[in-house]
Image: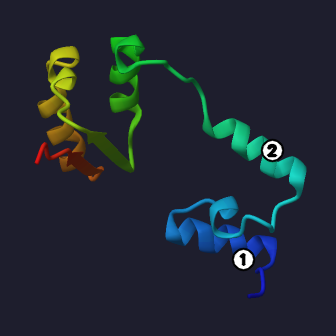
Amino acid sequence: MVTPYPRHRHAIAALLQQTESYLWPNALPPERVTRVAQSEVVRIYPRRSAVPTEVWQQLLEQAQDRIGILVYAGLFLPEQLPRLIPALKAKAEAGTRIEILLGDPN
C-alpha cells in the first residue's frame, strides 16, 4: 500500500475522523510519533474513585463531537454527576454523538 503525501493524509484523516498516526503508523517521523503518543495520555488515575468530580464535569462540558461511555454498571456516574442525563440530552440535541455501552452480568 502506498502512503499518501502529507497534505492528502491530513485531508483523508479529517474526513475519516481518525488521526494520521492511526491510519498510517509508519508515515510519521519517529520524533513526531513520540510527541503524538505523549499527547494522547493527559492523566492516569489508579481507580475510578480517584477521578475528581470536576474532571468528569469538565470532560462532559467540553465534549463537542462525541461522548463515549463504556462501563460495567456505571451507577457512579449519576451519583457523581446528578445532571448527567439532562446534560447528555442537551449535548445530543446540539449534535454531539452519544455512545453508551453497558456491561451485561450474564
Measured as percent of width and height from the top left, residue 21 is found at 69, 60
Report the residue that reaches farthest toward the front. Answer: 106
Q: Quadrant of residue 64?
A: top left
User: Could you tell me which secondary element the residue under label 1 belongs to?
Assistant: helix
In this view of the protein, which residue sits in the foreground, 83 or 78?
Answer: 78
Q: Is residue 94 visible?
A: no
The answer to whether 44 is drawn above or below residue 73 in the figure is above
Q: Which of the two discs, 1 and 2, labels the residue nearer the N terminus?
A: 1
Residue contact between numbered discs 1 and 2, judged by CB atoms under 8 Å: no
Q: Residues within 10 Å of mark 1 (few under 14, many from 20)?
A: few
Looking at the image, which residue is at 57% across and 23% down? 43
Residue named by callout 1: 8
In this view of the protein, which residue sits in the foreground, 3 or 65?
Answer: 3
Residue named by callout 2: 34
Looking at the image, which residue is at 72% across and 76% down? 8
User: Could you tell me which secondary element the residue under label 2 belongs to?
Assistant: helix
